[in-house]
Image (cartoon, grey):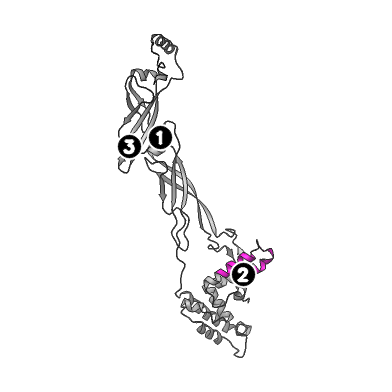
């Protein structure tokens, strides 16, 4: 069997951190993408890392190959010491004068001893894996940030949307290690992650403002080592509208009125998202004049804004012959020059 410690350039006393550091250094140097001639060595490096970084595999490897002086196991405070494992190993040998214990144990003449040896080794491993050792701390998954566009109507009345979100999760095949038996994981292609597309239903509340953020818990990227998922944050973008805008909690509504309505005044019906409302226009109303409807704005944090209606006079696109004749009569009756004092103002 190959000497995995020599391959990684470490000693049997090396810690897991030292083994991981050595592996990363060698993997960068001999990866087939970087060094095409190092494919065989890269496989040996990966095999060595997978064996020595896994506590159970390392203990089995050390026991079979006689590496009984490793202090790393003492740090792990295992229930069975390396000396005890060595003694059990020696008891299974049928030839005490042999210098090659592994060969003696697995000799075809000692099949029963081999079975006993395997059982004892498994018992040792079972005790070892149940011993106290440090486990990697759980890490919360990264949050995901997305933007969602909604209309003015949806901002005022609220809405529900189905959105597509791409989640990053630990590759279930290689458990995030990127390699399997020295080969690049075929599922994640060596990234250690797998992407997953999800459709999520999101409720947008009423009276939401532009730029507001919605938080959907646990819909972010998956955590590591049993950690919680991250969260999904949705930034609200309200699509611009030439008629309606927001000023704080106030709704600003630009509406047209006819020349007749401007001159004579009266009640007009104005369409809104929750039905029409009535607005009283006084006689001789000018373009740009504002009307405030108290308590008709957005409701947020216990405060209610107003609706501010800006009116501007607009000529209808089509006029009947009778309407044209009436305007001609008005032209003859009108004697005021409204542009006379433009330069004197």
Distance between mark 1 and mark 3 Cα atoms: 13 Å
Quadrant location, the C terminus? top left
Distance between mark 1 and mark 2 Cα atoms: 64 Å
Is residue 327 at all visible to an observer of this figure? yes
- Residue segment shown in magenta: 21-41
Mark toward the start of the polypeptide (2 vs 3): 2
Mark toward the start of the polypeptide (1 vs 3): 1
Quadrant location, the N terminus? bottom right
Q: Are marks 1 and 2 in contact (CB under 8 Å)?
A: no
Mark toward the start of the polypeptide (1 vs 2): 2
Residue at image location 41% in from the left, 33% down from the top: 244
Q: Quadrant of residue 132?
A: bottom left
The secondary structure making up most of the magenta span is helix
Report the disc number at residue 305. Answer: 3
Report the disc number at residue 127. Answer: none
Residue furthest bottom in the image? 97
- Residue 263 higher or lower than 159, as above or below: above
Residue with the mark numbered 1: 245
Q: Horizontally, is 255 left or right of 57 in the view?
A: left
Find numbered disc 1 in the image and state the secondary structure of the residue it sits on. strand
- Residue 137 higher or lower than 267, as above or below: below
Q: Are marks 1 and 3 in contact (CB under 8 Å)?
A: no
Measuring from the top left, give residue 87's x and y in whole percent: 53, 86
Residue with the mark numbered 2: 45
């Amino acid at each position: 069997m190959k000497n995995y410690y020599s391959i990684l350039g470490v000693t049997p006393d090396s810690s897991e951190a030292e083994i991981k550091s050595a592996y990363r250094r060698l993997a960068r140097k001999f990866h087939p993408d970087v060094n095409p001639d190092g494919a065989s060595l890269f496989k040996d490096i990966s095999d060595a890392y997978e064996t020595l970084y896994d506590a159970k595999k390392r203990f089995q490897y050390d026991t079979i190959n006689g590496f009984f002086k490793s202090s790393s196991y003492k740090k792990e405070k295992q229930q069975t010491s390396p000396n005890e494992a060595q003694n059990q190993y020696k008891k299974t040998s049928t030839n005490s004068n042999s210098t090659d214990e592994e060969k003696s144990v697995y000799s075809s003449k000692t099949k029963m001893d081999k079975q006993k040896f395997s059982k004892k080794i498994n018992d040792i491993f079972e005790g070892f894996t149940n011993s106290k050792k440090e486990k990697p701390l759980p890490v919360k998954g990264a949050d995901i940030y997305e933007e969602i566009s909604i209309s003015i109507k949806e901002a005022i009345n609220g809405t529900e949307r189905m959105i597509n979100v791409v989640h990053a999760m630990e590759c279930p095949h290689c458990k995030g290690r990127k390699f399997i038996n020295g080969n690049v994981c075929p599922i994640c292609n060596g990234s250690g992650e797998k992407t997953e597309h999800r459709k999520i239903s999101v409720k947008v509340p009423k009276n939401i403002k532009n730029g507001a953020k919605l938080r959907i818990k646990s819909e972010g990227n998956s955590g590591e080592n049993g950690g919680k998922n991250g969260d999904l944050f949705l930034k609200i973008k309200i699509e611009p509208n030439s008629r309606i805008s927001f000023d704080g909690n106030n709704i600003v509504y630009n509406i047209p009125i006819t020349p007749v309505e401007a001159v004579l005044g009266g009640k007009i019906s104005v369409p809104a998202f929750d039905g029409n409302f009535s607005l009283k226009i006084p006689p001789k109303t000018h373009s740009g004049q504002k009307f405030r409807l108290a308590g008709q704005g957005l409701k947020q944090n216990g405060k209610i804004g107003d609706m501010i209606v800006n009116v501007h006079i607009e000529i209808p696109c089509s006029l009947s012959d009778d309407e044209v004749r009436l305007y001609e009569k008005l032209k003859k009756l009108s004697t005021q020059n409204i542009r006379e004092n433009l330069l004197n103002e």
